[in-house]
Amino acid sequence: MLISQSELVAVLDDSPAGVVILDAQGQVVYRNKYFCELTFHIAEQVIACRQDMRIDNFQVRYKRQLDYRILYVSAISEADERINPNDSLLRIMLEKAESSNDMFDAIAEAIFEITGWRWIFITRFISEKSVETISFWDTDRHAIGASYELDDTPCAELVERKRYTLFADVAKTFPKNPFLAELGAKSYAGLIYYGEERKPLGHIMCMHDSNDVDYKFMEDVVKLASLVISSNLLLAQAKSELKSAIDQASIDSLTQLYNRRMFEERCEQVINDFRTIDLDSSICIIDINDFKLFNDSFGHPKGDLLLRLFANELSKLGSEDDQVFRLGGDEFALITSKVTDQAIQRLKEQFEAAQQRLSAVIDHPVSASIGIASLSETEANLEQCYEFADIRMYKDKVRAKAG
């Protein structure tokens, strides 16, 4: 008997794992309650996954069904940690990669710390016959790498084999390569890492000055390193694609400010901050005075220019953490952490100075009105806070017309 859609949703809702389903455009079409309990940071990384991987203390399982991506997220227990001894090696690499500004340098250093091999190279392919070293660990430090040709190198055989490759006495095996002899290299282990659609992007090459090494352990380490590099590159690309899609849905095309949808989401965030950590914020509603008259007098192109310039001025108000939104037409909003009388007065002074600058640029008097209300005034009642700010904005508009 076929299971109905409602029965399937009920099963997923009761799943002990977090479940999220995305359509072909990367939009979330379903998520169960356990997935909703994840932090935003973890959830964002899970949504970007395109393969099985570990994120912090969670294991993500990836499945593709027709045009949908289905991701299952489960917490990793201590018992799970003991099942796979390679997890500790993987954790070291992931921690190194996450804490470093350069993933490749971090992985090279992690391989050295785990294995003790003296020379670790991570390269990228420039062409079929040449590579560029993007990270080089030499004995006890990062060193400057260089480009080199693959001919008469163990890397050439690695590229040809397309699998884990090792040599027990690499300098003797490749006598025409002076670099290997000068280095004093004996052991060699290497593996290609891949990008999207299994495209080979570069390789990991490890060498040591001794044959007394555990090649099987080195194979595990190099394979894990390749996995970490590939997954990080794919994740970075997925994040970039996801961010681009989110930005397109969140940004006002004319002013490049966040739109009303993002304003509403941000309001929910500041309300949560107020309720959980007692962090107060102010909502500012802003409107250009007589904008319709300006549009009718000078035309829509000049009106659009005014909106873009006005948005630019609003973006300079407050601090870096404050956010500006275009709600529609000539109505804007600003969410700021400024709540004291002195801070609000300073914000209003900045707002007045912005109008003066804009009037000079447009070569026409430009004025705008602002109304400000803090969450603490309404005990985090969003509708009431918005209403207070809106009423104060209209009072400011009346004063401007009267003046």
Image: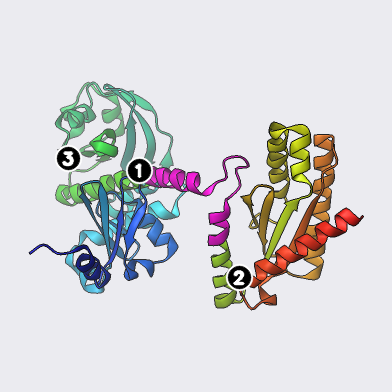
Q: Over which residues does the magenta segment extend? A: 236-265
Q: Residue at label 2?
A: 382
Secondary structure character of the magenta stretch overall: helix
Residue 339 lies left or right of residue 242; in this view the side is: right
Question: In the rendered view, would you say 268 is above or below 45?
Answer: below
Looking at marks 2 and 1 on the same chain, the residue that comes earlier in the sequence is marked by 1
Q: Residues within 10 Å of mark 3 (few under 14, many from 20)?
A: some
In space, the residues marked 2 and 1 are separated at their CA atoms by 41 Å
In space, the residues marked 3 and 1 are separated at their CA atoms by 20 Å
Secondary structure under tag 2 reads helix
Name which residue type carries label 3. Answer: Tyr
Q: Residue 385, percent across and down?
A: 66, 70
Secondary structure under tag 3 reads loop
Q: Residue 363, percent across and down?
A: 84, 34
Q: Residues within 10 Å of mark 2 (few under 14, many from 20)?
A: some
In space, the residues marked 2 and 3 are separated at their CA atoms by 59 Å
